[in-house]
């Protein structure tokens, strides 16, 4: 058991060296640990292409994971072999690939979206409103910094979104007052944190190295900070994280039930509804693609299946009888 532990420490060190996020670090370490246990705790240096293929096939056939999940596991194992063990695996030709299944997204009607605010309040309401009003993914809105809100240009900047891409998102006019109030609250809290010797936030590695004191600057503070602070063990700084995603997910689920919406609504449903309602309003699909930050137009096309005019916008011939 001690050998895998030492190996995983090496993995964590390499992940930090390559400036991967903490979320990626947890994911990669988890997949590598499961790979080791799948092969009876054998050290990966004694395993190779055959064993990696067996594990990835097991995920697809026995666990029936999604293609993206299998790809994530593959990425973790390739990182292990290339960056830690310094071994280049041959092309994995024998892997059974997980089948991608097209799922039509759950979309709320406009009336259903309008009913949610009655069951949300404060920060939860504003975060949910931004996910629907701007098309944010949950972590994109939670990771907003105060400098990302541009009231003059009526846009919100998404930094390092999915695929590590930046993009501009809509700033709903109806949320201007609420957002300004939120920023004022964040500024007051930050001033109090500074007085107590805290006031730090986590920064991108390059920024932290170039500007060591930027982590206490108001422009880098989270728009939606957590209610608690924590001490970072690496720097001994008293930091504040952003609002936790699980809290928002739980509150949206509770609000959906309270509103009596007969659908399985998640935080991502608000983003789906944003895209679908824009298309219903006649917006060009390429504009919607850009606002969502989709790399492929095919990804955005899925919303044409859930327009309120029926699948693909078609009209049943029965209605012409």
Image: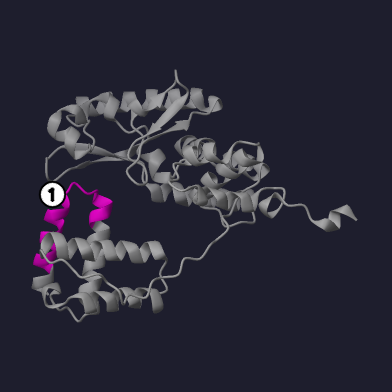
Q: Is residue 189 left or right of residue 3?
A: right
User: How many numbered circles are shown?
Assistant: 1
Q: Secondary structure at mark 1?
A: helix
Task: Please name the residue shown 60% across and 44% down the image.
Answer: 276
Q: Residue furthest right?
A: 321
Q: Is residue 116 left or right of residue 85?
A: right
Find residue 309 and report its horizontal and vertical position in percent: 72, 48
Q: Residue beneath label 1, please?
A: 17
Find residue 219 and report its horizontal and vertical position in percent: 29, 25
Q: Residue furthest bottom?
A: 40
Task: Please name the residue shown 36% across and 32% down the image.
Answer: 223
Task: Please name the residue shown 65% across and 36% down the image.
Answer: 282
Q: Is residue 155 above or below residue 8?
A: above
Q: Is residue 206 above or below residue 314?
A: above
The quadrant of the picture occupied by the C terminus is bottom right
The quadrant of the picture occupied by the N terminus is bottom left
Q: Is residue 179 left or right of residue 90?
A: right
Find residue 214 and report its horizontal and vertical position in percent: 19, 28
- Picture colour scheme: one colour
Mark 1 residue crowding within 10 angstroms, few (<14) / some (14–19) / many (20+): few
Q: Is residue 169 above or below residue 289?
A: above
On the image, which quarter does residue 213 sit in?
Answer: top left
Residue 132 appears in view: no
Find residue 36 and report its horizontal and vertical position in percent: 20, 74
Which one is nearer the viewer's eye here, 101 or 251? 101
Q: Is residue 219 magenta?
A: no
Residue 160 appears in view: yes
Magenta residues (range):
5-25
Q: Is residue 19 magenta?
A: yes
């Amino acid at each position: 058991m001690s050998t895998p532990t030492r190996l995983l420490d090496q993995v964590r060190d390499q992940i930090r060296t390559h400036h991967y996020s903490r979320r990626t670090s947890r994911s990669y370490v988890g997949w590598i640990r499961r790979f080791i246990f799948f092969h009876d705790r054998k050290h990966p240096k004694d395993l190779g292409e055959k064993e990696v293929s067996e594990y990835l096939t097991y995920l697809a056939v026995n666990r029936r994971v999604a293609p993206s999940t299998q790809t994530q596991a593959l990425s973790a194992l390739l990182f292990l072999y290339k960056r830690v063990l310094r071994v280049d695996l041959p092309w994995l030709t024998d892997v059974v690939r997980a089948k991608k299944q097209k799922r039509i997204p759950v979309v709320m009607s406009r009336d259903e979206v309008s009913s949610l605010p009655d069951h949300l309040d404060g920060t939860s309401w504003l975060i949910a409103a931004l996910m629907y009003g701007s098309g944010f993914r949950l972590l994109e809105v939670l990771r907003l910094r105060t400098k990302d809100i541009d009231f003059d240009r009526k846009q919100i900047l998404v930094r390092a979104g999915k695929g590590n891409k930046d993009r501009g998102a809509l700033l709903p006019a109806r949320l201007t007052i609420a957002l300004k109030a939120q920023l004022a609250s964040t500024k007051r809290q930050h001033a109090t944190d500074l007085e107590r010797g805290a006031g730090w936030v986590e920064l991108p590695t390059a920024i932290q190295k170039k500007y060591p004191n930027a982590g206490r600057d108001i422009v880098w503070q989270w728009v939606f900070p957590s209610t608690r602070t924590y001490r970072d063990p690496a720097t001994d700084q008293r930091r504040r994280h952003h609002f936790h995603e699980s809290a928002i997910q739980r509150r949206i689920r509770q609000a959906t039930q309270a509103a009596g919406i007969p659908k399985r609504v998640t935080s991502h449903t608000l983003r789906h509804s944003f895209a679908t309602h824009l298309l219903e309003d006649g917006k060009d699909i390429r504009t919607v693609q850009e606002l969502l930050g989709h790399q492929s137009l095919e990804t955005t096309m899925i919303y044409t299946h859930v327009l309120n005019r029926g699948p693909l916008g078609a009209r049943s011939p029965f209605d012409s009888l």
